Image (cartoon, rainbow, N blue to C red):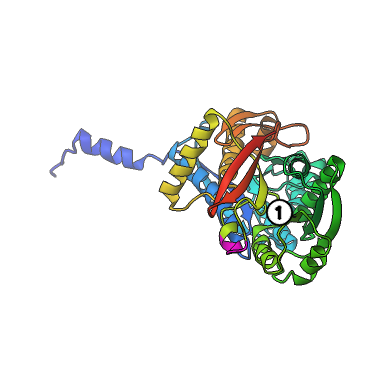
Amino acid sequence: MQVKLISAAVVAAFAWVAQPAAAQTVVKIGHVAPLTGSIAHLGKDNEAGAKFAIMELNAKSLKIAGSAVKFELLSEDDAADPKQGTAAATKLADAKVAGVIGHLNSGTTIPASRIYHDAGIPQISPSATNPKYTKQGFKTAFRVVAHDGQLGGTLGRYAVQELKIKNVAIIDDRTAYGQGVADEFQKAAKKAGAKVVGREYTNDKATDFNAILTKLKAAKPDLVFYGGMDAVAGPMLRQMKQLGINARYMGGDGICSAELVKLAGNGMSDGQVVCAEAGGVEGAQVAKLDAFKANFKQKLGMDVQLYAPYTYDAIMVMVAAMQKANSTDPKKYLPELAKIQYEGVTGTIAFDNFGDIRNGALTLYTYKGGKKTQMLVTR
């Protein structure tokens, strides 16, 4: 019988093929925002920020606890509806995600936060600003932007002290966000010396405001404050112009989007609208954020609308906590998240005892020549 000799190289090749693949840990991170409905453009902006972060993290080939890590984004649509929001939260809890980034709205973030808390899942909202979210005592709840107490208060003081407004009318959409920011604005404006000449309510899906605007027109306000989102603010501005209400218009981060110009059509004049966005950068940080926005557009083919950079940073700070703890187990990395100090594209991220960002910045904007224009950054 003839024996065929097999070369050492062939043996080595077969031995290599037989080796098991390197161990890899798949880490699931949830993201929730309204991906359908009137503010889907903002939800998709947040989702894009999350996808961009996951894409960059996976390109780094990170190792945690000696194992290669692959991050997987589980994205859910809450349609800005509290019931759908809790359903999405339950689904992510059942999927045993390592953490959740979201939700976008306070009205969905607050009820969902209890589900994440009960499941022991850390949650970072990149955009929910109602103070109640972090005042529930849930050690799993964090946010990377300033809350309504800061935002509404700043706008109220600015309206009176800088714009010299004397009579204000206030409208809100009855959501947790809209009512919350309107209440804070009202408190600050009154304290600064303004008179509230009317307080009216609508809802976050309304399109006809003639009745409440006609009522407010008779009160002759110098400024109309709206607590709600841009999808309602745009049509409201158009109807204000049709009714001949030549008042200033102000709102929080919900209206402070590039999309407002399109939604308002010809209903908005230069400098008429002043809004505040939770967050903002100054000095050397400006170039860092501008570079992020340029890279974001190059890689994803879309412009940043509002909170994509904060969603990106929320994922990055969560993963940084995992790295510090050398674990993707929520119970083990949560203590590191609570005490972390992280330099993100939106600035320094560190949390207080409630889970709110320390020294949260606010940026005031107006609109000129059809473009959103920064006025100032304050803290």
Given residues 75 and 104, the one toward you in this image is 104
Residue 326 in sight? no
* Residue at the outermost left position: 2
Image spot of residue 167 (x, y percent): 82, 52
Compared across the picture, whether 6 is left or right of 59 comes to: left
Compared across the picture, whether 365 is left or right of 68 comes to: right
At a point 84% along the width and 46% down the height, the residue shown is: 194
- Tell me if residue 177 comes above or below residue 37 in the rendering: above
**Could you tell me the amino acid type at mark 1?**
Arg
Tell me if mark 1 has few (under 14), some (14-19) or many (20+) residues whose alpha carbon lies within 10 angstroms of its own: many
Give the structural element (helix, strand or loop) at label 1.
strand
> Where is the C terminus found, in terms of image quarters?
top right
Image spot of residue 241 (x, y percent): 67, 65
**What residue span does the magenta drawing correspond to?**
262-267
Residue 373 in sight? yes
Picture quadrant where residue 246 is located:
bottom right
Image spot of residue 188 (x, y percent): 82, 43
Counting every numbered tag in the picture gives 1
Given residues 333 and 370, the one toward you in this image is 370
Compared across the picture, whether 228 is left or right of 197 comes to: left
Given residues 334 and 306, the one toward you in this image is 306
Image spot of residue 189 (x, y percent): 82, 45
Q: Is residue 263 magenta?
A: yes
- Tell me if residue 146 comes above or below residue 84 in the rendering: above
Picture quadrant where residue 242 is located:
bottom right
> Where is the N terminus found, in terms of image quarters?
top left
Q: Is residue 326 magenta?
A: no
Report the residue marked by disc 1. 248
